[in-house]
Image (cartoon, rainbow, N blue to C red):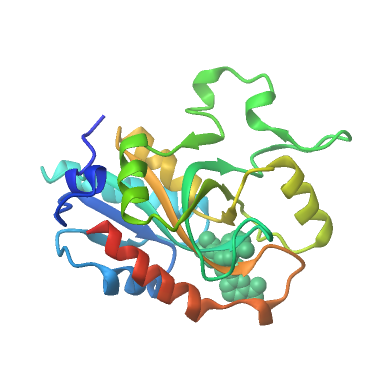
Amino acid sequence: MAETPASVADAGPSVTAGLLVVTAVPVEAEAVRAGLTDPSVTVAPVGVGPAAAGAATARLLALAEAAGRPYQAVISAGVAGGFTGRVAVGATVLGDRSIAADLGAESPEGFLPVDDLGMPPEVLGGGSDLPADPALLAGLRARLPRATVGPVLTVSTVTGTAASTAALTARHPTAVAEAMEGYGVAVAAAQAGLPFAELRTISNPIGPRDRSAWRMREALTALTAAAAALG
Ligand SMILES: O=C(O)c1cccc(C(=O)CC[C@H]2O[C@@H](n3cnc4c(=O)[nH]cnc43)[C@H](O)[C@@H]2O)c1
């Protein structure tokens, strides 16, 4: 396991060499870059959804390693939906775990996480629930004391009905947000042996689809403010 960059781990001086921050789309990457003071932090848009984001992150990590300049840690950053009553639109969230919330099987009794399907552990990697690196998370918490900390769900479909919102809320009573990339990026980081964390700002409440409720500008402004914690 690579060492967590010193400045993020101990909230010390703003020197974060070797940190890779990945976002889904370029506008999120621009928002992160606008808040950084450390030019050594790399910010890259890697695509929407866990597959695109995971594959592109893995490629960036492998290329850097092959070039003899391996990254030291990975952060998945961007906007997210927030669970109503747990986190407000415009708020900043730090994921203490990134959970593949729709990786599994349906059954008449309800959703079964992939970890409960009886598969051999070696095909599950670290499972569908990957914790953030404790030292990296501690450093980010120290620099973002007002952030809400909790599980962030990764979904392949944005939740958009009352029924699916209720089911997801019940299945994940402590989750604070849902987005579409964190788990995929976490898998790429884990396979490279690197510390991982997820940083999100809330653009919309999770619930019945209502595009008029999205506050993208507010979330991107919050993302720029939060990015100052990264270096
Ligand atoms: O529903 C639409 O018309 C629509 C139009 C443009 C973009 C979207 C997205 O869902 C963007 C997904 C993108 O942003 C993150 N994100 C933000 N809020 C949520 C959410 O409530 N649930 C899941 N993902 C969300 C996500 O990480 C993607 O990168 C929709």
Number of numbered discs overlaid on the protein picture: 0
**Image location of residue 45, percent across then percent down:** 36, 64
**Image location of residue 31, percent across then percent down:** 35, 73
Residue 207, placed above or below residue 51: below
Q: Residue furthest front?
A: 145
Q: Residue furthest right?
A: 108
Residue 210, placed above or below residue 202: below
Q: Residue at x 52, y 71 (%)?
A: 90
**Quick one: 166 or 140, which is closer to the camera?**
140
Does 186 sit left or right of 100 as displayed? left
**Quarter assignment of residue 106:** top right
Residue 85, placed above or below residue 222: above
Q: Quadrant location of the N terminus?
A: top left
Q: Residue at x 72, y 75 (%)?
A: 210
**Image location of residue 102, percent across then percent down:** 66, 44
**Quick one: 215 or 71, which is closer to the camera?**
215
Ligand 1 placement by image quarter: bottom right
Does 142 sit left or right of 120 as displayed? left
Does 11 sit left or right of 196 as displayed? left
Q: Residue at x 31, y 62 (%)?
A: 44
Q: Residue at x 53, y 56 (%)?
A: 49
**Image location of residue 174, percent across then percent down:** 63, 43
